[in-house]
Image (cartoon, rainbow, N blue to C red):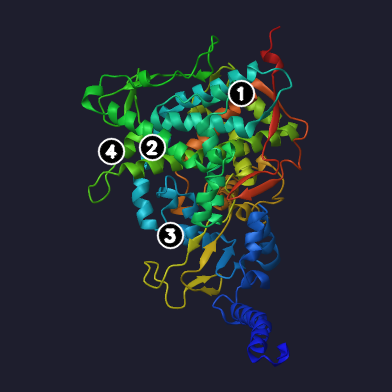
Amino acid sequence: MSPSSDPMLSLSLTALVALPVLLALALVVRAVRLLFFHPLSSVPGPWYAAVSSLWITTHVLRLEQCKAVHALFQIYGPVVRIAPNKIAFNDLGTAKTVYSTCKFDKSVYYKSLLTNDNDHAMTTLPHAQYSIRRKAYAQHYTPSNLAKLQPEISEATGQLIEVLHKLPTNTAIDTLSLFRHLALDIIVASSYGFRLGAVAKWAVDSEDGLSRAIGDFPKRGILRSAVPSWAWALVCKVPHQRLRLLCASDKIMADFVSTRVYEMRAMLTPSAKTTPIAARRMPFWSSTKPSLSTSSSRSASRSASEDSFADTTGATKSYLLPRLLAFNYPNGVPMPEQDVISECMGHMVAGTDTTSISASFFLWELTRRRDILNKLRSEIDAAMPDARVIPDIKVLNELEYLNAFIEEGLRIYGAAPSLLERVVPGPTHSSGFGADGFDLLGHAIPSSTIVATQAWSMHRDPAIFPSPDTFLPERWLPSSSSRDADAERLARMASYMMPFGTGSRICGGKNLAHITMRVLLVAVLRNFEVEAAPGTDEKSMDMRDSFVMFPAAMECKLIFRPRASLLPS
């Protein structure tokens, strides 16, 4: 019998030919439904984004999601469909509704940032549950409490300044790494009252293991979320030391925090009340030279309070960890140790790379703008006559041009410029949305749709920020003879700023970041001339994003030379 006369073979060949045709037809039908018969069909945007998530995924993988979404706003207007079930918007009123008034819950994207396989405030999706978690640490980040912690911040910064002074001339420094070590020293000190010494390890060319783990953690999250669980388990067994460290980054952080929890619990027991907390910490400063310090430097010791420590002047300072250990949930149950550990880990991750990234971009901008540097330095030199004594934070907060510089820096170089995803709630939500869904600039958005805005675009609205791509601190200064007109203009710009997020879920560590940035900038600019190292240019510093922003070269190499006025005569 010939093959052509075999009915079973003919049927198989027919099925083989028909299968791809049917598959193609199914894809066409799906695309037509998504384009013309979907509830989001009226939302403008490229057709290929409406029928597949491939477009947005491609730009995520190319580390340019912010720029790609911003380009769509410029083509289609303030609301655009960027995936079959995802809408991006660039509108202040809508942002207030989504993030402040109605407090939409977060999307599942944030689960990729779990620490110790457990939720912390940032990964808690329902807003109501987040509000409870936030109460545990909110008081820690108040300006009044952080002002008491300025000695720790200034001591850590002082060690960094001392390290830079000792470097050979013309040494190119990757500030992304150095400032991450500094930010970690500060966060560990303010969270646990513990001297980590990360900058000291960096100075002897020994990267701190905890700092490396924090740098690896976001990469771990991206890789883990991109592959099945069985594939992730195989990846972690690959006999490659660097890959093993990346896979273990979560555990390294968890082990560090667990040790601090154990030590703190021991200190808070009655038998430990007379033991100074400093006895369990490494000294910040080991140089024989006088350290860079605040004008009212203080040393901490244990107080009679369960969650506070007193300095030698009698003022109390509260670290983050004792607050979490003392916190009870509304049902009266203390925060479980697993939640305490995850929360502390989340704060370390959120506050290190973001600070180092922004500070690095700020200084790189100054290497290109001598006019801005001269104005900053004039103001800083007057406020800080002794290059080794950092003024009190109250003094730094009053430096008008420094404030304008930081605000403009956060506008252009804020470390978290990406989409802040939220989920449109159902009709039973307290917002009162009906069956027609959420009205987003005239479009009825059904429940379960993901909506988001991004700081990248809000900060670059030319109607609010003329010449939005120009770094111009003067835009934040009074510019007219009318005080009311200036106040209105500045308030309007401020309402569009969201470098730390926006609404009720704004970054809890915002105030600590501001203090750290001020102390670091004044200390560096008072002591050093800063130059871009060879190879550090517009191309290497081109902005990329993967939720947080970073330079294309993944490094920012700068040269720090002591100012002539500080050199021996």
* Separation of residues labelled 4 and 1 (CA atoms): 39 Å
Q: Are marks 2 and 3 in contact (CB under 8 Å)?
A: no
Label 1 to label 3: alpha-carbon separation: 46 Å
Three-letter code for the amino acid on which mark 2 is drawn: His
Mark drawn on residue 326: 4
Mark sitting earlier along the chain (2/1): 2
Q: Amino acid at mark 3?
A: Lys
Please name which of the two marks, 4 or 2, marks the residue nearer to the observer.
4
Depicted 314 relative to depicted 92: above or below: above
The residue beneath circle 1 is: 205
In the picture as drawn, the residue positioned furthest to the right comes out as 534
Q: Which sits earlier in the primary sequence, circle 1 or circle 3?
A: 3
Secondary structure, mark 1, is loop
First along the sequence among labels 4 and 3: 3
First of labels 4, 1 by sequence position: 1
| Quarter of the image where the N terminus is located | bottom right
Three-letter code for the amino acid on which mark 1 is drawn: Asp
Disc 3, SS: loop
Query: In which quarter of the view is residue 105 placed?
Result: bottom left
Dot 4 amino acid type: Ala
Q: Label 1 near label 2: C-beta < 8 Å?
A: no
Picture residue at 54% right of the left edge, 40% below the top: 244
Q: What distance separates the C-alpha of mark 2 from that of mark 1? A: 33 Å
Give the x, y percent position of residue 490. Answer: 58, 47
**Measuring 39% from the left and 33% from the top, which residue is drawn there?**
145
Viewer-nearest residue: 191 or 530: 191
Give the percent coordinates (x, y) of residue 166.
Answer: 64, 16
Choose top left, top right, bottom left or bottom right for residue 561. Answer: top right
Question: Residue beneath label 2, please?
Answer: 140
